[in-house]
Image (cartoon, grey):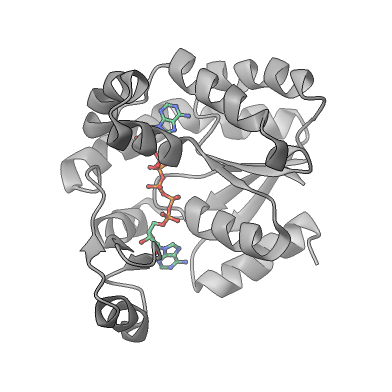
Amino acid sequence: MRIVFLGAPGSGKGTQAKKIMADFGFPQVSTGDLLRAAVAAGTELGQRAKAAMDAGELVTDDIVLGIIAERLAEDDCANGFILDGYPRNLQQAEDLQPVLEDIGQSLDAAVLLDVDMDILMKRLTGRRTCSKTGKLLNIYFSPQSEIDECLEQGGELIQRADDNEETISNRLKIYREQTEPLIGFYRDAGLLRTVEGEGDVDEIYARLKATLDLT
Ligand code: AP5
């Protein structure tokens, strides 16, 4: 299964990709995670990407193309992958084609997680990661038991640097301007599947699996 996840910031791409990875073994390839790791490691690439990420702007196409080509060539992507956060504009969608040809693969589907804009802000301002387990949580939506589990293990609830209201507003604006046109691009290619992304995480996951014929 080779999937692209479309969807606004906060639509649940990471949440759902992790569930597929856990159940079916296809690796989640998140350009956001790869870029944050580069920033944290202080690499030259990370230093070049940091200012754009802090402002909620897109990192340049050449930087993300380099990291995605390198990642998709790794062995664990040979039997499938979930692209989470790439491509993010039409140029990146064009850039992806030769990368896939080089590794002899093609996409099976582009999944749009469809969520209303007013829900996204709350999901993003409430997002936290447990410093101990790495689990993705939300102070507004996660069951208290999951938050307590993190704290009881001595974990802290870490907020992402770009999950503040100003940066989120810009990320949503950039999504509407640059990423939404990909919906038409993948519809024209016959690959688009739309999944209702509101409601309970497990209900959305059930809809997603049904859409992708994953059993
Ligand atoms: P990236 O890391 O890709 O962030 P994003 O697209 O803004 O997406 P998010 O991770 O914010 O949201 P998500 O859809 O994964 O939601 P999640 O599952 O976490 O990119 C960050 C930055 O990197 C970009 O701004 C850019 O600068 C750069 N970048 C990355 N890729 C790039 C590219 N290709 N080109 C150029 N630049 C690039 O869920 C969010 C929250 O909601 C969580 O707390 C979760 O617990 C909660 N939640 C999820 N589902 C539900 C539900 N059903 N009900 C209630 N809560 C829920």
Residue ID at (31%, 76%): 150
> Whole-percent x and y of residue 36?
35, 38
Horizontal arrangement in the rendering, residue 31 relative to residue 81 (left or right)? left
> Whole-percent x and y of residue 115?
47, 55
Residue ID at (62%, 56%): 195
Residue at the limit of the structure toward the bottom, as seen here: 145
Horizontal arrangement in the rendering, residue 133 relative to residue 140 (left or right)? right
Q: Which of 74 and 57 is in front in this view?
A: 74
**Vertical position of residue 36 compared to residue 128: above or below:** above
> Whole-percent x and y of residue 163?
24, 48
Q: Looking at the rendering, which quadrant does residue 119 occupy? A: bottom left
Q: Which quadrant does the C terminus fall into?
A: bottom right
What is the tally of numbered marks visible in this picture? Answer: 0
> Whole-percent x and y of residue 17?
57, 54
Residue ID at (48%, 35%): 31
Residue ID at (23%, 24%): 51
Q: Which of 154 and 210 is in front in this view?
A: 154
Horizontal arrangement in the rendering, residue 24 relative to residue 127 (left or right)? right
